[in-house]
Amino acid sequence: MDGDVAVGVKRGSDELTMYSSSPSSLTANGSDVKKQRLEESPPSRVLHIRKLPNEVSETEVIALGLPFGKVTNILMLKGKNQAFLELGTEEAAITMVNYYTAVTPQVRNTPVFIQYSNHKELKTDSALNQRAQAVLQAVSAVQDGSSPSSDPGVLDLAPPPSPVLRIIIDNMFYPVTLDVLQQIFSKFGTVMKIITFTKNNQFQALLQFSDPVNAQQAKLSLDGQNIYNSCCTLRIDFSKLVNLNVKYNNDKSRDYTRPDLPTGDGESTNKDHSLLGTPSGALASYSSGGGYSSSLSLSQGGGAISPLSAAAAAAAAAGRVALSGSGVSGVLLASNLNEENGTTQASSLFGVYGDVQRVKILYNKKDSALIQLSDGNQAQLAMSHLNGQKVFGKVMRVTLSKHQTVALPREGLDDQLLTKDFSGSPLHRFKKPGSKNFQNIFPPSATLHLSNVRDGLGEDELRLLFSNSGGTVKAFKFFQDRKMALIQMTSVEEAIQTLMDLHNYDMGGNHHLKVSFSKSTI
C-alpha cells in the first residue's frame, strides 16, 4: 500500500454525475443515451463514491467493496460526503461497478453513486488518513485470516468464535429460500451446510462455512443489509454451535459435502420436500446489529455477484406487487440488440421474466428498445438475468429507464411499426396468481424447457426445428407424457436466440410451442 505520499484529492471528471439505477439519478442524467456514455468511463481499480450520508463510517464504505475482493486503500472526504475506494485488482472494481450499475448501492438507506476514478491507484498520507487506515488494516486482517493490529476502538474484530452463523430475516415480505442464502453467502467462502427453520414466528437459518474467518467476513459485510429492496433484512450473529448435523438434503436443510443424503421420505435428493423443524442444539443469543441498510438485490451481468436472482423469483412466486414507495420503473432500456429482430422477439425474451406490456424500438437507434413490463419487480428481475448476456454476437445491455411508461404513437405516425402493444397478449406467463411459472424462473442457460408439444411430434422434428433456427442441438430428452421436453444447445447464446425465434411457434392444430430456460442439464 502506498503510505507516505501526499493525499490525492480527485477533482474534475470524478465529480461527474455517475450513472446509477436509482430513479433520482436517472432524472438528473437527463436521458438514457447519456447514461450509456457515462457507462463507458475507462475502468480503474480506484472507485469514486459520492453522496454518502453524514457521519458515515469507514467500515460502511469498505463493506460496499468487500464482497468483490480485497480492499487495498480508502480515502474519506467527509466534508464533501465522498470517498475513494481502491480494490486489489481492476477486475474486482469492474465487477463491483457492473453490480452496482444494475442495483442502487445504499448506505444507511441512502442511495450513493459509484463510478471509476481517473486515478489508477490511490495515494494517501497515512498521517492525515490515520483512522481510515486503521479500519482498513483491521478488515485486511480478517481477509487474510490474521489477528487485526488496529485500535480495538475502531473496529471490533475479535477472533471468530465459530464457523456457524445464525441468520434471522427481519421484515420478510417476500419468501427467502435456502438456495438464496447459499448464493449470497458463498461469495465469502465455501458454504458447507445450511439448516432453515421458523422460531418465534421468524424465519431463521444456521449456516456453516468451512472456515471461521469466512464466517466473520460474511457477518462483517452482510449484517444489516437487505436481501430485497426495502425488506428481508439480514441480522447475523455467531452461533454457539461449531458443527451442524444435517440429516436430509431438501428445501429446509442441505449438507453440500454429502450429496448422497436422503430427502427424508425415501425420494431422490433432487426433489423439493419439507422436513425438519428446529435443529437440535443450543442457539446463540441474538443481539441486534446496528448495521446500515443496503440493497443486495439483482445483478448478473459482467460477472457480478448474483445473490438475488433467486430471491426475485421467490418474490414473484409470492404473487406480490411492487413495494409501495419503491419508485422503481417498470420500463427497461435494452441496447446493443440485433437490429434485424423486431418487437416480437424482444417480447419473447423479456417475457420469460415478466409480462411485457409494450415494446418500442428507438427511431434513431434501431439497436435499442424501451420495454415496459407489468411492474418494477419484473423489470428488475429481467434486468438481473439479461444484462450482459451475449445475443447474436453482441453483449446486450439492460438498464432501468427514466420513463415510467412506453407511450403508444398517435394513429398513422408509426409507419415503421417500431412500437407494439402486448398488454392483451395471451402469452403472458405471470398474469394468473399462483401460476407454476412463478416457480420456474431461471437465468439464461444452454438447456431449454419445451412445453405444449403437439401430439405425434417426435424428437427428430423438434431437433430439426431448433437446428433450422441457427443453433446446434447437443442433447434432447422427452418427459414421460411427451408434451414436454428438454433440449440442450451448444451455448447460452444459441439458446437465447432460439427461444426468441421459437417461443409461441405455431406447430399446427392450435398448438403453440412454449419455450423457457431450464436449470437442468441432459
Image (cartoon, helix red, strand yellow):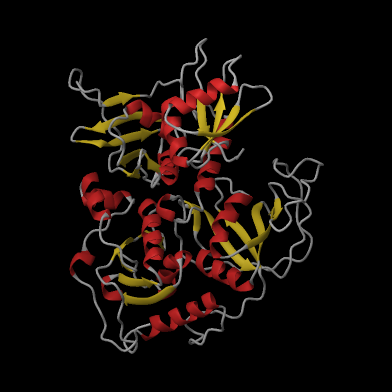
Taking 182 as reference, is 348 above or below it?
above
Name the spot of residue 251 as percent of width and height, x first: 68, 46
Name the spot of residue 317 as percent of width and height, x first: 56, 38
If the image is split into quadrants, where does the C terminus sit? top right
In this rendered view, identify the residue nearer to me: 329 or 193: 193
Name the spot of residue 173 as percent of width and height, x first: 54, 46
Name the spot of residue 257 as percent of width and height, x first: 71, 58
Using residue 450 as the reference point, say whether residue 368 is left or right of it: left
Instruction: Look at the image and tell me whether residue 93 can be seen.
Output: yes
In this rendered view, identify the residue nearer to me: 267 or 252: 267
Using residue 268 as the reference point, say whether residue 499 is left or right of it: left
Q: Which residue is depicted at the point 33% across and 76% down?
A: 76
Taking 19 as reference, is 75 above or below it?
below
Q: Which residue is depicted at the point 41% across and 50% down?
A: 301
If the image is split into quadrants, where does the N terminus sit? bottom left
In the rendered image, which quarter is residue 451 located in?
top right
Q: How many tags in the picture?
A: 0
Taking 101 as reference, is 152 above or below it?
below
